[in-house]
Image (tube, rainbow, N blue to C red):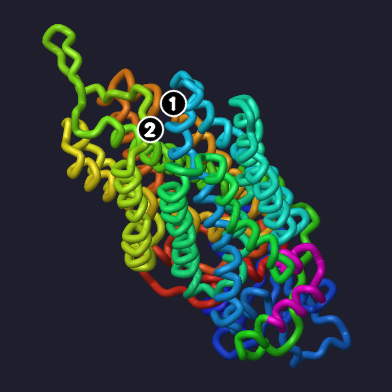
Amino acid sequence: MNMSNWGKTSNISYQQWRDPEISVVTFRGTAGDSLRHDEEDQCGDYEVYTTGMHTVDLGERRTGQDPTEDTFTVEDAVEAIGFGKFQWKLSILTGLSWMADAMEMMILSIISPQLHCEWMLPSWKVAMLTSVVFIGMMFSSTLWGNISDKYGRKVGLTMCMMWVLYYGFLSAFSPTYGWVMVLRGLVGFGIGGAPQSVTLYSEFLPRKSRATCVMLIEIFWALGAVFEVLLAIWLMPTMGWRWLLGLSTAPLVVFVTFCFWLPESPRFDVLSGNRENAMKTLRLIAADNGKTMPLGKLIANKQEERGRIRDLLTPQYRRTTLLLWFIWFANAFSYYGLVLLTTELFQAGDACGVITQGAKTEPKCNLECKYLTLDDYKDLLWTTLAEFPGLFVTLFVIDRIGRKKSMAMCFLMFSVCILPLYACVGRVALTVFIFIARAFITGGFQVAYVYTPEVYPTATRALGIGTCSGMARGGALLTPFVSQVLLKKSVYLTLSVYCIFCLLATGASMLLPIETTGLGLQESSRITAGQEEMKTGQMSNGSEASPTQTSYGSSYNS
């Protein structure tokens, strides 16, 4: 190894020298060089073994190894193949799962007032009807993530979508409140696996396209929410909520019909030791996109231990994981709270009653049993359309100011838009402020979906999204008791709760230790503290990292 190139090719920090557990650092050559590995033990001229501060030993090449043979990683192959016809088809299919998820969520704000009046339910039972769905999602999100990390992304996503289709359709035939509770809870259990579509989708995307594509696939969420409102306008006045529940499973029918086409992620195949399947999938994608595969052999670093929660809480991930759990909690708490709050405030209209307690006055919304009117549905549709500008605004800034600042901006703007609601504003102003607030909280949610799979390695990526989604469902579980129950007692207190949570989430977003903009998806579950310092330093300095540096972990052995 030419020692004059040492400073150009190595990234060994002082902290790495001091850490006796850091045993292998893999080097990639500079531009024009090839990364060379031995297929079996992967020891070559580009690996350095460190056993302490004082000894460095270069590994010897195995006899008979072809010195001109090139190797490549899945990350290299995905970058070479790029974005094309295959990714467009994958976008549509995975987008259908998002559309179904959005429709099942939007149903909650539509059927709750209907059952409240039809079955004369008290407000706590109405809140439980919503919460039971999120209870199912909260308990299942980690399970679906574990299944996806251990048995494959395709397996986990297909199973959960079939589950939602079955129980979603059955819930349309619920004879009593108890049956609605049980079946909608089972639907929620299945929906907990829907975020795994992002895991699968992101692992097929090249670095430059990833943020844009993951953001754009969220358009299917917005389409699902809008379609659900339009379906309700058509069905609720004449055919009722049972037909609404049954026909809302239409996107799932399409997904399940075509799910046989879904390929397994090559990143998962490589990590599970199935290099042949990974190569087969990559060749099919290259042929579909009209591109050529990189020359050489695919590096397959098998990792037996996958999908372990304790790997999310190791020193290099603990801070990131805890902050992300809170961010996802606050995001879902605020997003679903605003969705439910919209229905309640629209029913109250611009005639908020005033309770006088001594010298203290406070608006109180009149929340007795009321069926949703056509005007309510129209305003609900307008505020739902806010999903689209929210996505496009966030899409514009996410690669310009970074993931962390984008999330912080969305939380802060949500809080600012909630403040005018402290006044008893009229219906038009109410619609405008809710529209803007929903646009920003939607954008923040989608940035979290971009950031989370980027920050975790392949071995725990699905579980990372699953646990974050589980925390989000915990926030969604609690929010009905604020937006539907607490609102009946105090409008001021209800709005204050949402403002405070979003302000705290603004700070949490800025405290995240890693900015993932421009970084490749990491393959190994081992990242050294020195590497994190290198990544953070690169992004804070605004420098453009090289492909080797941005693919942090793709060439590191687990």
Question: The residue under label 1 is which amino acid type?
Answer: Cys
Among the 4 quarters of the image, the one containing residue 539: bottom left
Residue lying farthest to the front in this orientation: 238
Determine the secondary structure under disc 2: loop
For the residues labelled 1 and 2, say whether their Cβ atoms are less than 8 Å apart: yes
- Magenta extent: 263-284
| Residue 14 visible within the image | no
Residue under the point 61% across and 78% down: 86
Give the quadrant of the C terminus.
bottom right
Among the 4 quarters of the image, the one containing residue 415: top left
Up/down of 117 relative to 466, above or below: above
Residue lying farthest to the bottom in this orientation: 68
Determine the secondary structure under disc 1: helix
Residue under the point 34% across and 64% down: 392
Q: Was residue 265 drawn as part of the magenta stretch in this picture?
A: yes
Up/down of 223 relative to 368, above or below: below
How many residues crowd around disc 1 within 10 Å: few (fewer than 14), some, or many (20 or more)?
Answer: some
Give the quadrant of the N terminus.
bottom right
Residue under the point 19% across and 28% down: 351
Task: State the residue position of label 2.
Answer: 371
Q: Position of residue 393 (x, y in %)?
A: 31, 62
State left or right for residue 279 relative to residue 400: right
State left or right for residue 365 relative to residue 448: left
| Distance from Cα at disc 1 to Cα at disc 2 | 7 Å
- Depth order, front residue of 368/297: 368
Q: Can you tell which mark lies on residue 117? A: 1
Q: Which numbered disc flags the more N-terminal residue, 1 or 2? A: 1
- Depth order, front residue of 450/41: 450
Q: Main secondary structure of the magenta part?
A: helix
